[in-house]
Image (cartoon, grey):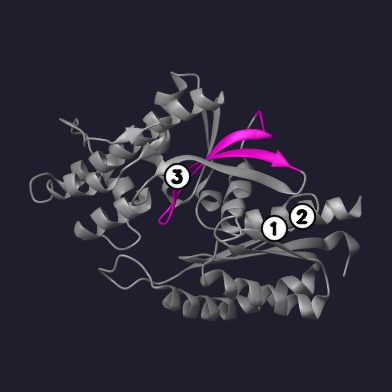
Amino acid sequence: MKSDNNIILGIDTSCYTTSIAAISLDKSIIFNEKIMLKVKENSKGLRQSEAVFQHINNLGTLGDKLYNIMKMYNIKALCVSTKPRPTKDSYMPVFTVGYNFTKLIDSMLNCPLYETSHQENHIEASLFTSKLNQKNRFLSVHMSGGTTEILLVNKKDNGYNIEIVGGSKDISFGQLIDRIGVKLGYKFPAGIYLDEKAISCNEKIEQGLKTSVKEGYMNLSGLENQAEKLIGIKTDEYISKVVLDSIVKNMYKSLTYVCWEYNINEVVFAGGVSASKYIAKKLSKQLEKNNIYTHFTSSEYSTDNAVGCAIIGLNNFLKQQN
């Protein structure tokens, strides 16, 4: 085994994806594997107990690939997401699977084990290929199946100081998309289908869905009710476009307020919903008119992954070496 084959291993077991990633000490991605959890047809999600069971099986499936990595590379440190957010009261059973799996590996390797949160994992992964100018202070928007939050991020020595400064007060963007998508007959998660339909729709939006936004915070459940009324009246393409357009409008109103309030003009996007090409293109164009610049990353880093965990582990490992 060569000494220059040193890597950091990251593991994340979120609500819908089992992820393992590895990064070299010079920040090259060596390994980035993920398995989506299976959701029954016509279902709107998974119970935590179902997700835990699937994570256990998926980590077993990924075990062979991980074994090959361990034969070829020298794992110098491990990093795992142990909770949804970097707060004391943050907890979700799915993350205990990844944590215990990582502890098992650590017991064999006897190397440093670092803990992080799913939210910090997403932020770090979204920054991996971005050309952010101000990396010490910026806004991060997390749009996923479980979360729609606007975060004020300040860099600190051991990670980030994260403050929620906007977002949804009820359902998330991901829930809105999936609920409407399932009712249109698409598989869960439905984001990719609505995105394709919206992009292919040439029909102009006659009257968009009414939004409810105040000082960076949004109420989204009303959008679901409005969109449901269009089913059977409008085409799937049009409904998909209207739903994604409503997300753009909500986020535009929220971000223009928050950016003005905190004197920030750069926004980094993370989470599965941010992988939407329709949302990224239209929102970026609208915000740029207000001198607000967006940073959308590729889907492999914006959707659930463990690359952020690996990077966080690397950063902690390098600090201890200095």
Q: Residues within 10 Å of mark 2 (few under 14, many from 20)?
A: many
Disc 1 residue type?
A: Ala
Which image quarter holds the N terminus? bottom right
Can I make out residue 105 in this image?
A: yes
Q: Are marks 2 and 1 in contact (CB under 8 Å)?
A: yes
Q: Position of residue 31 (x, y in %)?
A: 66, 62
Q: CA distance from mark 1 to mark 3?
A: 21 Å
Can I make out residue 199 in this image?
A: no
Residue at 78% in and 75% down: 71
Residue at 71% in and 48% down: 159
Instruction: Classify 284 as above or below 272.
Output: above
Marker disc for residue 310: 1
Residue indicated by mark 3: 274
Instruction: Classify 212 as above or below 24.
Output: above
Q: CA distance from mark 2 to mark 3?
A: 25 Å
Q: Residues within 10 Å of mark 3 (few under 14, many from 20)?
A: many
The rendered magenta stretch, by its main secondary structure, is classed as: strand
Lower sequence index among marks 1 and 3: 3
Residue at 73% in and 51% down: 28
Q: Residues within 10 Å of mark 1 (few under 14, many from 20)?
A: many
Q: CA distance from mark 2 to mark 1?
A: 6 Å
Residue range (magenta): 133-156
Residue indicated by mark 2: 314
Q: Position of residue 77 (x, y in %)?
A: 79, 64
